[in-house]
Image (cartoon, grey):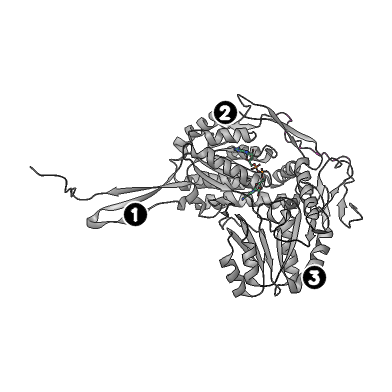
């Protein structure tokens, strides 16, 4: 009922429903979009506007004001005030409210998923999983909030030490556009769990679901000012990084901006957590289950139109199976259904914006210039009404690649896989590590020892054995090398949002060799 087939053999979904609206009816077009002190507010000093688009149609969903320094300051002050009482609650009390927000997310899962799709362009089935993962995040951290604690250390002669794990104060969160609500949840949930308050700035391209989350937080009973939201561009982010009363910046985004943030935060030595980009390897050994390896390569390259930081776009395949693997991978990729992101049958939606799509296509062109051969995809797909102004790119596989090509070295952040042959375990590990990044990696093999040997030597924060891009909240997620500092998710995130205080308690008279008794 919904698809037509193109010459490139990609199925393209075409919605026949003319009554369907392709912009959100949930939001008025001109805000207010900030959320401070429990209320939607306009910035007090906006420094311009950004048009928020539906990437599948280019329809303007909202016109959002860019918050200036005074607006950021107001949000920080509100967080400071709220911190006075939020930080004094017990972990258990905070945990109940944080879990309640998880429940509210679940109750609104479909609405949030649709809003995410309209603002991000990813297919609805993915957005539903994203929203589920956001709920999981709040339920998980709500559940462990009462376990955040320090320790007691016995010292000589009945003296003792207390190691107290304390909150930091006001945290500044800055997010990327590819997983808008998940990025926000991964920062807000652990920050609040530890007793901090947070001012969050979503990407200017995808600001809508974070606003919905801030509203749901109030409905869940989280006090006003604990989670404030300011909208804006990099300029707003800079103001947050430079604010003297922000104790920590938790950033998700690109490596260059991450480096810049580290510099900004160094002025007053703020704590910094960076979740950055990557150019990750996926290693397919010749003893793998081939069908699972093909599924893994699809997950490693074409989720969210390839706009995933942990993607395994350097697909290393052992030479003896490269022909068979490539044939199956190309076949599966060519069958992916591109179309209306809100349609249940769609597997691949729209890339985030025109400039981004152009950047991805330019990378593909550069790859071909440098000698790569395109096996499928890599074209802008001109979609029928109402998607003719959307930026849909067919998933692309490049072969005849080598390690020095631009497409193999740089993060493309689009649906582009490069296939690289290898012969030995030693060789592939060396080549996989030959990158300034270290976010993730994947290994497909049936040999358990080989899997462990390889994962021991890969320089990546996350390694998937016989799967790819699975991120349960129980496991830490963070980068080695230039992919970042610190981790999100898991009990380890607690370290990133707290500081330790040692309290020594003397139980005897002071033994002071400097004191001369009269
Ligand atoms: P980006 O770095 O361009 O922007 C990220 C955020 O930083 C946005 O909110 C932006 O407004 C803000 N910003 C820009 N300049 C700033 C400045 N000078 N000071 C403070 N804030 C500033 O990244 P993007 O294009 O939104 O996202 C794509 C990148 O994010 C990719 O490189 C991807 O790999 C990475 N990413 C990493 C993870 C991870 O967990 N490691 C997750 C998602 C995305």
Q: Nearer the viewer, mark 3 or mark 1?
A: 3
Q: Is residue 148 visible to us here?
A: yes
Mark toward the start of the polypeptide (3 vs 1): 1
Q: Which residues are magenta?
A: 18-30
Label 2: which secondary element: helix
Asked if residue 299 is among those painted magenta in the image, a careful observer would answer no
Asked if disc 1 is less than 8 Å from ligand 1, the answer is: no
Q: Is residue 222 visible to us here?
A: no
Mark toward the start of the polypeptide (2 vs 3): 2
The one of 108 and 458 positioned closer to us in this rendering: 458
Who's the residue at 72% across and 53% down the image? 406
Relative to residue 129, is residue 111 depicted above or below? above
Who's the residue at 24% across and 55% down the image? 158
Relative to residue 494, is residue 66 depicted above or below? above
Mark toward the start of the polypeptide (2 vs 1): 2
Q: Nearer the viewer, mark 2 or mark 3?
A: 3
For mark 1, what is the residue? 152
Relative to residue 45, is residue 199 depicted above or below? below
Dominant secondary structure, magenta: loop
Q: Residue furthest top?
A: 44
Q: Quadrant of residue 291?
A: bottom right
Q: Residue 69 — which label?
A: 2
In the rendered image, the quadrant that contains the C terminus is: top left
Please indicate whether residue 500 sits to the left or right of residue 177 in the image.
Answer: left
Other residues around mark 2 within 10 Å, as few (<14) / some (14–19) / many (≥20): many
Who's the residue at 63% across and 46% down the image? 254
Marks 2 and 3 sit apart, C-alpha to C-alpha, by 57 Å
């Amino acid at each position: 009922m919904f698809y037509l087939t193109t010459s490139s053999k990609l199925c393209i979904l075409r919605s026949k429903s003319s009554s369907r609206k392709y912009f959100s009816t949930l939001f008025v077009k001109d805000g207010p979009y900030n959320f401070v002190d429990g209320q939607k507010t306009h910035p007090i000093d906006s420094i311009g506007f950004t048009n928020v688009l539906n990437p599948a149609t280019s329809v303007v969903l909202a016109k959002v004001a860019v918050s200036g320094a005074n607006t950021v300051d107001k949000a920080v002050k509100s967080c400071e005030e709220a911190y006075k009482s939020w930080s004094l609650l017990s972990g258990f009390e905070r945990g109940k409210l944080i879990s309640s927000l998880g429940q509210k997310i679940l109750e609104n899962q479909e609405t949030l998923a649709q809003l995410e799709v309209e603002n991000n362009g990813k297919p609805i089935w993915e957005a539903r999983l994203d929203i589920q993962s956001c709920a999981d995040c709040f339920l998980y951290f709500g559940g462990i909030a009462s376990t955040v604690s320090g320790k007691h250390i016995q010292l000589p002669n009945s003296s003792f030490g207390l190691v107290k794990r304390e909150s930091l104060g006001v945290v500044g969160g800055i997010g990327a556009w590819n997983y808008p609500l998940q990025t926000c949840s991964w920062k807000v949930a652990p920050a609040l769990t530890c007793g901090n308050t947070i001012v969050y700035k979503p990407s200017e391209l995808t600001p809508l679901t974070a606003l919905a989350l801030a509203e749901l937080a109030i409905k869940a009973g989280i006090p006003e000012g604990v989670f404030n939201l300011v909208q804006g561009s990099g300029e707003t982010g800079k103001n947050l990084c430079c604010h003297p009363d922000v104790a920590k910046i938790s950033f998700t985004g690109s490596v260059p901006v991450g480096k810049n943030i580290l510099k900004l935060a160094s002025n007053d030595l703020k704590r910094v957590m960076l979740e950055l980009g990557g150019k990750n390897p996926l290693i397919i050994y010749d003893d793998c289950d081939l069908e699972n390896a093909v599924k893994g390569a699809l997950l490693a390259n074409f989720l969210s139109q390839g706009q995933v930081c942990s993607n395994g776009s350097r697909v290393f395949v052992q030479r003896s199976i490269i022909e068979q693997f490539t044939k199956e991978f190309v076949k599966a990729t060519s069958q992916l259904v591109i179309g209306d992101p809100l349609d249940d049958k769609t597997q691949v939606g729209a890339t985030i914006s025109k400039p981004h799509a152009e950047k991805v296509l330019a990378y593909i062109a550069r790859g071909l210039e440098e000698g790569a051969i395109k096996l499928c995809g890599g074209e802008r797909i001109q979609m029928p009404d109402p998607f003719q102004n959307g930026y849909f790119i067919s998933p692309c596989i490049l072969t005849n690649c080598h390690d020095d090509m631009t497409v193999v070295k740089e993060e493309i952040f689009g649906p582009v896989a490069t296939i690289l042959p290898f012969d030995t375990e030693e060789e592939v590990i060396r080549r996989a590590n030959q990158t300034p990044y270290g976010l993730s990696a994947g290994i497909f093999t049936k040999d358990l020892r080989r899997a462990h040997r390889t994962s021991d030597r890969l320089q990546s924060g996350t390694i998937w054995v016989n799967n790819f891009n699975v991120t349960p909240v129980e496991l830490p997620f963070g980068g080695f090398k230039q992919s970042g500092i610190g981790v999100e998710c898991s009990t380890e995130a607690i370290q990133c949002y707290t500081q330790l205080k040692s309290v020594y308690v003397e139980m005897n008279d002071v033994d002071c060799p400097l004191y001369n008794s009269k």
